[in-house]
Amino acid sequence: MRLGNGYLYLTLAAVVHTALAYSHADFQKVPTKVVWAVTGRDVELPCDVTPPLPSDAVSMVFWFKDTTGTPLYSLDARGGALNTASHLTMSDDLGTRSYFITDENPSRARLKIHRVTHEDEGVFRCRVDFTNSPTRNFKVNLTLVVQPSTPKIFDAEGKEVKHEAGPFFEGQPLFLSCQTTGGKPPPRVTWWANDTLLDGVVDTGRSALTAVNQLVIPKAPRSLRGSRLECRASSMEIAGDIVREVPIIIFLKPNKVKIVTPNELLSSSKVETVRCETSGSYPPAKISWSLDGKPIRNQVLTEEETSTSTTSILSLRTTPDDDGKDLVCRASNPRFLGIYTEDRRQIHVAYPPKVVVRLDTGSSPVQEGATVVLRCDCVARPTPHNFNWYHNGYLINYNESAGILPIDDLLTINRIEITSDGDYSCAATNSEGETYSAPLNILVQYAPRCKKGYETMRVGAVPFESMVVHCHVDALPEVTRFHWTYNTSRGVLPIQGGKMQNKIGVSTLHFTPGAMDIDSLQCWATNHVGRQETPCLFYIVQAHVPEPPSDCVIRNATHGGGLEVSCTAGRDGGLRQSFVLEVDNLSGSGDASATVETTLSDQGAENATPLYRVLGETPIFRLHSLQPGHAYQLLVYAVNAKGRSNPPVMLTNIRVETPLENGLSREMVNSSSINLTLVLVILASAAMLLILGIVVVASILVCRKRPEVVMRRRSSRPPDELELSEAGFNEGFHRRSAQYRASVYNTELDRELDVTLNSQKPQGPDLILSPVSFTQQNAQY
């Protein structure tokens, strides 16, 4: 609030007394804060009135200017709060334009001066008296901002730009200099374009009278064309900017050129028009034409030009020799020497196709299983509308399931096979005719592989005895190398100490296995295509004595002496096994119930000879030589390279029917029941005939469905003095007659019969390393 003259007098007296007590030296020690002001605008001078202690309070605030001892503004807060204090100002101009603002935050209290004048510039002191704390002084230097002179713009040659800047060239350096003088504080000079700062660095020292900012753009951009550059100078932001504006001229290169006429087939019989357009150049670009690198001069040209684009229309007459040549439309700005932009296209003139077949997936020969792509390279105008492919002169049809895909100028063969090699040709057709290519020969090569039927085999082996294994492979080109490995519990190891003989497609290994656990042999072959992917595998079977047959059944006994013995084979001991049936006549001993000693018993007599012996690869035997009314003993056992099964299966007291016993059951014959009545004989015979008829019919039907094996009949009477090896049998085997040995060891074993039987017996080994071989027989004895 404003106070009266009486109170003013008392206050001034107190202030004068205080001012006299405050020396000039003390005034100089107070730190100074600079506050900038602009003439004609308001300014605020800060004064922190925060009490040093929370319990203290402000009693008086005085504002002084320069060294004047009389305050220009005072605030009396004695006896009350600061926001209710009394305000007292001098009656001069500065006092009337001043007002002290007490803020809610005491540190932000300030003296606001309205419409600053040049006379207001100077040093102001704020004195704050507290109730209990010492007095505090603040010094503020009020400084007026002085704006610099209006900026001037100069080019690279030092000439002042008064109207337009330039011309400058796109992509080339751009230089302009902006200068201004005076200003307090030293002014800031900046370059602007479209309200975007280009350069804000002053290139002169702040102590210089002239402030200079040099605008340097290494490559003038296209975006500056049509813009107006501004040089702005300002001593302080609160004072605003002094602006010098100048338009800029930039020459531009053509950035687009295009032959807009569709690239259609040109006819040599008439004149065709071709249109080319360009834009982006300033001034507008000039267009020129060339064909195959030679300027077009004797053709009709029409040009259309605007401020931003140029269009040229060429009337062109072509010849067949012009097919495939480049037609070029070139646009250039004459002010850019040697710089141009062009568009080119290859023109086409109609003619029949020219075709050639080439391999699109590498060089010939190709490898089996690869995907082969053949391309029918064609040069033709117009583009062919039909393609055909031929293999060895035959048309190739589309077959997706077989992987043969002739599609237009491409022939794709997926997973090519050996049968796919040969000559390939193509034919292309357009409006000018059809042309056939010369054939391309494709040779399909493949890595070695096991020959069919020799992929996996089993080899029976005896430790420390030599074995011979044959590895058969197919390959194209020929095999260059074989190698063998064997598989044990320790892993796969190369064969050492073996002898290998290699011929075309066959490797023969002579190998003696030790006592180690060899599981299998592997044979690998390599040719120029690569290594065999899957080896030929030979499983090593450790030989054991076979198990005896089981479940032997006798059936089909007839009055003619026919009898069939059928057993179930036991385990073969790891080698191919054969089966033996020995027949002994019990009736010849005089005691039909006596037990006859088997010839294979270790305790058998040397001269104990069976009636005859039947051999076979399966335990099924058919006997037709038994005499009715006689009792026989049958022994069945299995034999392999390691020995025979023990004990043999013994069938004793076997009889065949006599004419008087026709129709009686085997149990009735064996019991010798001769006291039955004729009625029972007739009834039993009728029943047996009925049952036998059913069995015979069923057997015939089954036999018709069973595949037959064609065998070569052997002579039933070998030479009398034939001597055969008996190796492979146990020590209990004794020498027999020549006829008996010939029945066991037949040296005229048919190779074709062995192959047939081997294919029917997959569970046995493929190779038996034994000096003994038994003939497959379901013998008709």
Image (cartoon, rainbow, N blue to C red):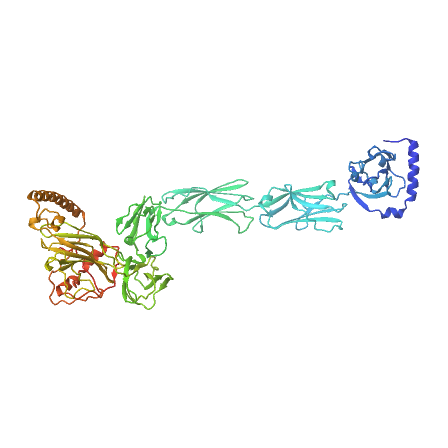
Residue 686 visible from this viewpoint = yes
Residue nearer the viewer, 690 or 198: 690
User: x, y (%) of residue 382?
Assistant: 35, 45
Question: Looking at the rendering, which quadrant does residue 42 occupy?
Answer: top right
Residue nearer the viewer, 464 or 257: 464
Residue nearer the viewer, 737 or 106: 737
User: x, y (%) of residue 583?
Assistant: 14, 58
Residue nearer the viewer, 340 or 406: 406
Question: Is the residue 748 above or below the residue 212 in the image?
Answer: below
Question: Is the residue 121 above or below the residue 747 in the image?
Answer: above
Question: Looking at the rendering, which quadrant does residue 573 occupy?
Answer: bottom left
User: x, y (%) of residue 51?
Assistant: 82, 40
Residue 472 visible from this viewpoint = no
Question: Is the residue 39 above or below the residue 558 in the image?
Answer: above
Q: Disc count in the image?
A: 0
Q: Residue at x 15, y 67 (%)?
A: 723
- The residue at the far front in this view is 675
User: x, y (%) of residue 554?
Assistant: 16, 51
Q: Quadrant of the N terminus?
A: top right
Q: Quadrant of the C terminus?
A: bottom left
Q: Is residue 509 left or right of residue 234?
A: left
